[in-house]
Image (tube, rainbow, N blue to C red):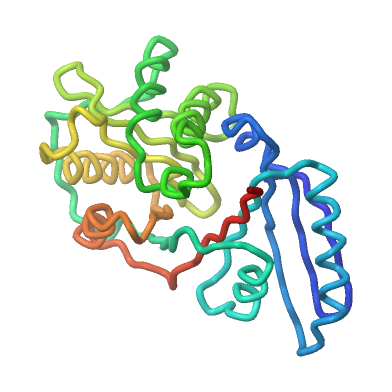
Amino acid sequence: MIATDRIAVPGLSLEFGLVPWDTAACGFPVAQITDLVLDGRDLESPAEGWRAFEAWRDRADVRLVSCRLPENRLRESMWLEAAGFRCIELVLQTETLLSRTPGLRDLSLQIGPAAAADLPHIASIAEEAFTTDRFSVDFRLPKAASGRRYRRWVESVPTHPTQRLVKIEDDGRIVGFFIVESVAGGTCYWHLTAVAPACQGRGYGKRIWRAMLDRHRAEGMERILTTIAVRNTPVVNLYAGLGFRFAPPQMTLHWVRT
């Protein structure tokens, strides 16, 4: 969660704030629009509120603003596009009930909490593993921003109150990691998941994901939630093959100061 401000004028409700972790990764102020609602056909009143947001953005010297919207929010997405935003990705929230996913019992993989000594290696994996995320594909952003973002995320988990860093090993070698969080109602959210780059393309994906489902089942979890990028078709197919179900897509838009 981020600290947010709100602008509400006739026809427009807008919530926004700075994103400190992305600001640190990018090396310049990054903001996020967390809620945007346009109501009615009067575009002059919303424009007044939007100008107030742009004034805040410019005072804070923000160079990147992101906004995620349901795919059917066309009025809002067109408004953002007219203001210089560009659609960067579509994402899918996906879930499965552990009662409907068969167990595999792949005992060749070892799963457990990452130790402090594992952190540098896992952070290096995170820095290199992600190539289809929105920070990687938006060519207007610094090339190193994506890797720094995920490295910092891994490094921050030991001090996070609820997130956990899980390592997956094969014969003592770390082949992947998950950042997970237990939420209400027996649900576990997978925030960040990766196969080590050196192990990609060798059949680890399905083995690791099935082993993680088995582990959560043993922990008493009932439901797994996560979010994936539509462009990452191997991962979409992996989740489909494991019986996950998909919600309607959402679109992520970026405004970048040029």
* Quarter placement of the N terminus: top right
Please tell me how many numbered marks the rendered image carries: 0
In this orientation, which residue lies closer to the viewer: 14 or 62? 62
User: Where residue 13 sits: x, y (%)?
Assistant: 79, 70
Q: Give the image quarter of residue 3.
A: top right
In this orientation, which residue lies closer to the viewer: 257 or 1? 257
Q: Residue at x 36, y 48 (%)?
A: 132
Would residue 240 be found to the left or right of residue 183 on screen?
left
User: Where residue 244 sits: x, y (%)?
Assistant: 30, 62
Would residue 126 be found to the left or right of residue 49 on screen?
left
User: Where residue 232 sits: x, y (%)?
Assistant: 30, 54
Q: Give the image quarter of residue 179.
A: top left
The answer to whether one can see residue 188 in this image is no
User: Where residue 138 sits: x, y (%)?
Assistant: 47, 49
Would residue 139 be found to the left or right of residue 79 on screen?
left
Q: Residue at x 77, y 65 (%)?
A: 14
Instruction: Tell me: residue 160, above or below residue 48.
Output: above
